[in-house]
Image (spheres, helix red, strand yellow):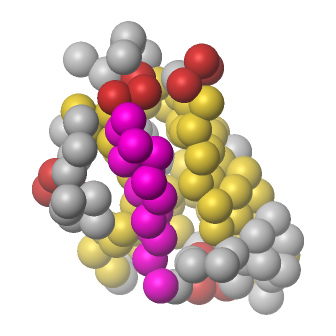
Amino acid sequence: QVQLVESGGGLVQAGDSLRLSCAASGRTFSRYTMGWFRQTPWKEREFVSGIIGGAGTTYYADSVKGRFTISRDNAKNTVYLQMNSLKPEDTAVYYCAARWGYTSNYYSREDYTYWGQGTQVTVSS
């Protein structure tokens, strides 16, 4: 069982930056593929970014490419999402997710086993 706890959300203005953190329990964190998803009341939960366990390969949704950066610190069992140049359309609840090992479906929420409780990000114009 893996528990995920997100933090770092908040209210910012357009153009500002935020860094989300997701702390994971358990051992062998480095082998978990980690993902960030986001959801609004009017949209399904959508993929934002992922980092493959072991290889460390990173992936991004087109909407955030060039603005967001995912990274992980395996010594701290933590994955981060650095969000720069935030836009009002980035407003959402952001969720951290984890699954054991590699997946080619890193963008699919159905492929993840564990989820955090979410953290609200609000970007004002």
Q: Nearer the viewer, residue 75 or 45?
A: 75
Query: Residue 89's spot in the image, x, y percent?
Result: 59, 85
Is residue 90 visible to us here? yes
- Count of numbered marks: 0
Q: Quadrant of residue 11?
A: bottom right
- Which residue corresponds to the image point at 38% horizontal and 11% vertical from the top-left? 27
Please, is residue 26 above or below residue 15 in the view? above
Quarter in which the C terminus is drawn: bottom right
Residue displayed at 57% across by 79% down: 65
Which residue is painted at 23% across and 44% down in the image?
102
> In the rendered image, is residue 12 in sight?
no
Please state the extent of the stretch shown in magenta in the rendering.
48-62
**Residue at image coords 27%, 59%:** 106
Q: Is residue 27 above or below residue 77?
A: above
Return the x and y of residue 96 as percentages of the image width and height.
43, 46
The magenta stretch spans residue 53: yes
Pick the residue in front: 58 or 4. 58
Farthest residue toward the top? Answer: 27
- List x then y, in percent, for residue 74: 54, 25
Asked if residue 109 is positioned above or below residue 67 in the image, the reply reads: above
Q: Which residue lies furthest to the left in this view?
A: 110
The spot of residue 67 in percent (x, y) is: 68, 75
Residue 117 vs residue 25, the one in the foreground = 25
